[in-house]
Each structure stands twice: as C-alpha cells, then as structure tokens.
C-alpha cells in the first residue's frame, strides 16, 4: 500500500538516541496541542537524529516527550528540523497528546526553557547561600483560600457558599457512624477536608464548562455531604444527588435537608440500585462522580457502564479520584510504608469495608473510560490537601516545586469524558 510522502515521519525517542519511520496521515492536520493516539514504531539506535531525518527523506519529525515540556536537546533538534523545512510534532505518549511546533512556538518553548534554567540557578544559589550563612529560610505561603479565589474569581463564591452550608450543619451531625465501615476516618478533620475540597469542586466545574455543559440536568453520583451538588444547584443546574442516605440515617439528615431546601432531588441507592437500574437511559446532560471509584470493590466497570447508559448522547462525565502515583505516596513506599488504611484499623473493620479498595494512575483512568465507550475530553492532575498548610518548607516545599513540573506526581486525577452522539455509531459498553 502506497502512502503520501507527507504522512511519513521520523519518530525519535525522548533520549534522541533511537528512531524509526512512522507513517500517520493524521499528523498533517495537527497544529495546536490535542489528544491523538500515536503508535510508537520500531526504533533502532541512531547517532544523529537530524542526519537520519534527511537520509530517510521524511516530511517531518515526531519527538517523544518524557516530561511536560521539551528540554534543550529536543529544542535544538526541532530547530535543525525546521531549518531544513521539515514539520516538527511533539508527542506526549503518557498523555496521548501531540502538538505541532513552528518557528513561533519554538521561540516560546525556548523562552520557557531559559526561565526555568534561571529559576533553578537562583534557587541553587539561594540554597548555597543559606547553607553558608544560615540566614536564608526557604518557605512559601500558600495563602488558602485566597489563592483559589484568585484562580477562580467567578465560580469561587458559589462553591465556597456550598462548603459553608455543609460545615454549618456539622454541629447537628454525629459523624462517628461513618467510621464503622471506614476506620481510617477516626479523628478525621471533616471541616478542613471540606474547605480544601473547594479546590476539587472548582476544577470539576471548570471541566464541565470547558466541555460545553453550562446548563441542564446533572447527577452527583456518590454525593455524600452534598457540597458538589449544592454548588451545581447554585450555578443553575437541575441537580439530583445520589448516595446511601438511608444507611447513613441521622448522620446525613441535616445535609439532605439542606440539599432539598436548595431544590436538589435527593435519591438513594436502595431505590435506584448500585448500577442505577431505577434511572432511565439518556437522562442526564452530565454526571459527576467525585471521589467514588476508589471505593468500589472488584472493578468499577459496572458503575462506569451504568453512568454511560444514563447519560444523554453527547453528555459529559466528570470524574476525580486520588492518584496512586502521588509524590507523597511514592515516598511512603520508598520508606516501606503502605499508602492505604493502616492494616491495624482495616483488619478489625465491620464488613463491608468502605475505604479505598484501589487507586489508579492517570493512564488507567483514561483507559477505563475509553474501554467503556467514552471519548476523553480532558485529563488533568492537581493538588489540594497540601493547601491545608499555611506555609510550606523543607520536604513539603521541595515536593511542591517538583509537582509543579511533574504532572503525573500530583494528588488528584480529574477527567471529563463525553458519551459520543448516537449518530457516530460507536458500540455501547455492553456490546464490547
């Protein structure tokens, strides 16, 4: 089978020491960064990737990225390829994303690289001076919640009001029954958790807006205290909140009352079923599944398939879950510690255990949604519990700075995924 010469590229690995010919007609239309699955071809060692490009006569070069942005070697190779009038495409395999690089964008990447180098030099110098003089104290004020208010100026007031509605109900609630099936909650600071969760709430709402869901009917699946549901209702969505409220009994009575006063329709798993059998297909414009799948034993497949079914065609699922590869988790494992509930607590728990059964990495979340039939619109990672500290220094500051540049090390994975329109002809989950 013959191929247009414009679809032939030299694929170069992130170390620039191996390359192979890639034929992909889709790359010709790439400009801005977007999601695209690119299959890595068979590679062989090369001494000079640019010379290899000219030798094979490829229309362009695909440079594999192992981190968030290109470093000096990748930028230098891209500059040589552009000078030879070849197209350049950057490929992030873990994020399944590509971006075409022209001279203007290359200049932008160079500026970012220079700034990063300058920052590292200043930081190394400050550390060295501090060690010599013992007068430099490296720390950073996190300024929560004002830092979040500045990042989300329009959405923050409604989200914060939702949080306050829930925390104001706490004096009326005995939350200790929640510990019976999830012993890691003993002594848990719920007020602080909910205040920090405004970060998750705002990222979720921003993802909905970015996916084009500004109005309509939304299901908050696993709504718990109802802070997300209250925010959605405050923003004008017709909101249903679903959880095991009959089992929670008086523990959640004040929360369900607050939701009903806000016009939220409160549903119970005992009525609709864990696989949402009591909800008709194609019911919702959006479903929020926030901090839920990590609590599902065995596999989240039936739940995700149920969400797919109750979403309207072109409806959007927004989901968040803890990142198993969170930097603090990695450090715990290096110390020989578990990242899950201490076994001393879980061993004696009442059945069923309702803590975290499994956590995931970004690629796994994206894979599951794709497997069920969704089209992933966006995937991001971010931190939130670290903002419970008013000021960070030492290891916390070092981790904070590392996570600023290493997206796969951050605490929370958030995905927005779309159910394809019926006309697209994609198979439904139960047909796969």
Image (cartoon, rainbow, N blue to C red):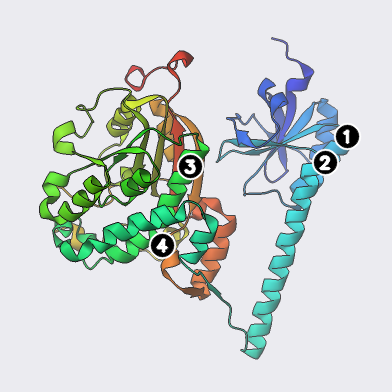
Task: Decide which of 194, 26 is in the foreground and name it.
Answer: 194
Q: Would residue 291 be visible to someone looking at this image?
A: no
Residue position marked by numbered label 1 in the rendering: 84
Residue 344, position as x, y percentages in the image: 20, 63
Q: CA distance from mark 4 to mark 3?
A: 20 Å
Q: Which residue is mark 2?
A: 103
Badge 4 or badge 1: first in the primary sequence: 1
Please state if 44 lies on the left or on the right of 82 as rendered. left
Q: Say if 355 sits above or below 78 in the image.
A: below
Element at badge 1?
A: loop
Q: Nearer the viewer, mark 2 or mark 1?
A: 2
Gap in angstroms between the C-alphas marked 3 and 1: 40 Å
Q: Which residue is mark 4?
A: 385
Q: Give the CA distance from mark 2 to mark 3.
A: 31 Å
Which residue appears at 50% of the width and 52% of the height?
A: 154
* Foreground disc of the pair 3, 1: 3
Mark positioned earlier in the residue sequence (2 or 3): 2
Image disc number at residue 291: none
Comparing labels 4 and 1, the label whose residue is closer to the camera: 4
Mark before the other along the chain sequence, 2 or 1: 1
Instruction: Work out whether mark 4 precedes mark 3 in sequence or the reverse, and give the earlier one.
Output: 3
Q: Could you say which disc has been placed on residue 207 in the image?
A: 3
Dividing the picture into quarters, in which one does residue 47 lie?
Answer: top right
Residue 399, horizontal then vertical, whole percent: 52, 65
Dot 2 alpha-carbon crowd within 10 angstroms: few under 14, some 14 to 19, many 20 or more: few
């Amino acid at each position: 089978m013959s191929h247009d010469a414009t679809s032939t590229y030299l694929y170069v690995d992130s170390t620039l020491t191996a390359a192979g010919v890639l034929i992909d007609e889709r790359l010709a239309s790439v400009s801005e960064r977007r999601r695209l699955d690119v299959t890595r071809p068979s590679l062989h060692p090369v001494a000079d990737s640019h010379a290899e490009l000219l030798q094979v006569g490829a229309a362009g070069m695909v440079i594999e990225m192992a981190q968030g942005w290109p470093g000096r070697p990748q930028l230098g190779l891209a500059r040589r390829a552009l000078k030879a009038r070849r197209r350049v495409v950057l490929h992030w395999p873990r994020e399944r994303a590509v971006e075409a690089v022209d001279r203007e964008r290359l200049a932008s990447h160079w500026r970012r690289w220079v700034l990063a180098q300058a920052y590292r030099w200043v930081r190394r110098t400050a550390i060295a001076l501090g060690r010599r003089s013992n007068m430099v104290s490296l720390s950073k004020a996190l300024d929560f919640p004002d830092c979040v208010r500045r990042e989300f100026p329009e959405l923050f007031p409604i989200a914060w009001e939702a949080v306050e509605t829930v925390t104001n109900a706490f004096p009326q609630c005995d939350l200790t029954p929640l510990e019976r099936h999830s012993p890691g909650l003993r002594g848990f600071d719920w007020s602080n958790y909910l205040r920090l969760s405004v970060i998750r709430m705002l990222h979720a709402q921003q993802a909905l807006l970015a996916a084009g869901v500004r109005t309509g009917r939304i299901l908050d699946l696993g709504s718990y205290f109802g802070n997300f549901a209250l925010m959605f209702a405050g923003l004008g969505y017709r909101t249903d909140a679903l959880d095991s409220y009959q089992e929670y009994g008086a523990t959640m009575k004040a929360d369900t009352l607050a939701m009903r006063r806000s016009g939220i329709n409160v549903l119970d798993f005992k009525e609709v079923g864990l696989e949402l059998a009591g909800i008709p297909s194609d019911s919702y414009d959006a479903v929020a599944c926030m901090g839920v799948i990590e609590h599902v034993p065995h596999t989240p497949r039936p739940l995700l398939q149920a969400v797919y079914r109750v979403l309207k065609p072109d409806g959007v699922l927004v989901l968040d879950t803890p990142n198993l590869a969170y930097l603090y988790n990695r450090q715990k494992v290096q110390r020989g510690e578990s990242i899950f509930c201490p076994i001393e607590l879980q061993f004696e728990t009442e059945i069923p255990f309702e803590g975290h059964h499994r956590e995931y990495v970004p690629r796994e979340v994206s894979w599951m949604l794709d497997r069920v039939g969704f089209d992933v619109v966006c995937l991001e990672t971010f931190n939130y519990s670290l903002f419970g500290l008013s000021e960070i220094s030492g290891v916390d500051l070092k981790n904070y700075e590392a996570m600023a540049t290493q997206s796969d090390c951050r605490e929370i994975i958030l995905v927005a995924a779309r159910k394809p329109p019926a006309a697209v002809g994609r198979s439904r989950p139960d047909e796969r």
